[in-house]
């Protein structure tokens, strides 16, 4: 097999790939720049491991399988027709981020509900705030939680919430694991939610799902968490709601523009916790990505179905 390994990997993950690809012709990423750089030798690669620029798709003449190093397919939305026409198989890292992303979501939510975010800021001023903060703390165990998305991440978020004792409902248009399946039922549930956690992908149906009108349905104490995709929330409307005290807080692992511009009002908005797209990370992340790819490669060589196959029409 002629394989291009263009994912961002550390020495440990690269070593795993070298061992697993010993019988293959391998083209390696040539720099640690944010995006891989084009080389003509990639034209003959049948398999690519990495999230490459969409503009490369027409130039990869021999491409048969693209293994993404993330779960997002939105970067290739404009290339979907060509990918389908050429029969290119696309797989993502479905399931790889469920545990860290779910833990990040709950860590952020708990930091707001238990007053940790306020106390952390007070520590910089060496100010004791117990009498101010303690009466306003809330319990996850007594909360009504709404999880948007019932895939791997959404499922694990729900599992952790239920372990804390929260009352949980899930929203997903087609999943039998969800109680809510349309926007009418979602809108009806929002006013009673203490915590809303979105794990939704980026699709035409989810972009700006939380616009000014839908944010206004949340209670003044509600916390909204986004660990899905950054185009879910109208950020100007969110900043307005936080500054006016119309919602209790937000946890954003993803934003519309990354890095978040220094001019964004969200940096200083009260009740905003910004986890800066670290939600899927952990110290074994890159090695796990390499292992996922190599396991899929073994399936490819034996003709078995691959894990994480993306429905190009749906975008996830």
Image (spheres, rainbow, N blue to C red):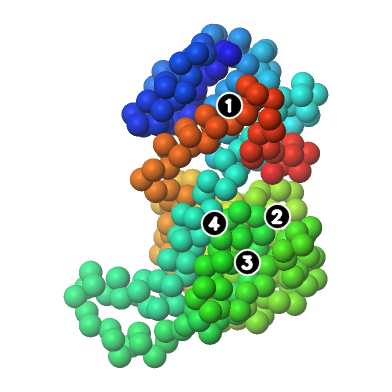
Q: CA distance from mark 3 to mark 1?
A: 33 Å
For label 4, the crowd category at 10 Å Cα-Cα, with few meaning under 14, some 14 to 19 and many 20 or more, is: many
- Cα separation, mark 2 vs mark 3, equals 14 Å
Left or right? Give the position of 93 relative to 183: left
Does residue 185 sit above or below 203 in this rendering?
below
The earlier-in-sequence mark between 2 and 1 is 2
Disc 1 target residue = 297
Residue where numbered disc 4 is placed = 227
| Residue located beneath label 2 in the image | 206
Which circle, 2 or 3, is nearer the viewer?
3
- How many tags in the picture? 4
Which of label 2 and label 1 is nearer to you? 1
Tell me: 65 left or right of 7. right
Residue 54 against residue 139 in the figure, above or below: above
Which mark identifies residue 147?
3
Q: In this view of the protein, can residue 42 be seen by the observer?
A: no
């Amino acid at each position: 097999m002629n394989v291009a390994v263009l994912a961002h990997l550390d020495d440990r993950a690269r070593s795993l790939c070298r061992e697993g690809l010993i019988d293959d012709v391998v083209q390696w990423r040539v720099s640690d720049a944010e995006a891989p750089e084009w080389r003509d030798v990639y034209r003959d690669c049948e398999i690519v491991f990495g999230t490459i620029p969409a503009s490369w798709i027409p130039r990869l003449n021999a491409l048969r399988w693209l293994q993404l190093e993330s779960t997002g397919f939105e970067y290739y939305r404009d290339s979907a027709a060509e990918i389908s026409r050429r029969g290119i198989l696309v797989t993502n890292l479905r399931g790889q981020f469920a545990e860290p992303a779910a833990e990040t979501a709950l860590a952020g939510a708990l930091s707001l509900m238990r007053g940790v975010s306020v106390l952390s800021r007070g520590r910089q001023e060496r100010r004791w705030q117990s009498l101010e903060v303690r009466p306003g703390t809330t319990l996850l165990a007594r909360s009504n939680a709404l999880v948007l998305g019932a895939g791997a991440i959404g499922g694990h978020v729900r599992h952790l919430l239920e372990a804390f004792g929260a009352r949980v409902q899930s929203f997903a248009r087609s999943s039998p694991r969800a109680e809510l399946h349309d926007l009418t039922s979602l809108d009806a549930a929002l006013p009673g939610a203490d915590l809303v956690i979105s794990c939704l992908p980026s699709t035409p149906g989810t972009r700006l799902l939380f616009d000014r009108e839908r944010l206004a349905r949340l209670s003044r104490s509600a916390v909204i968490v986004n660990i899905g995709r950054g185009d879910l929330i109208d950020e100007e409307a969110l900043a307005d709601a936080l500054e006016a005290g119309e919602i209790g807080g937000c946890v954003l692992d993803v934003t519309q523009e990354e890095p978040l511009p220094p001019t964004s009002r969200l940096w200083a908005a009260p009740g905003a916790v910004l986890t800066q797209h670290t939600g899927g990370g952990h110290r074994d992340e890159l090695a796990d990505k390499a292992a996922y790819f190599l396991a899929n490669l073994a399936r490819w060589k034996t003709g078995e179905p691959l894990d994480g196959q993306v429905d190009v029409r749906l975008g996830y």
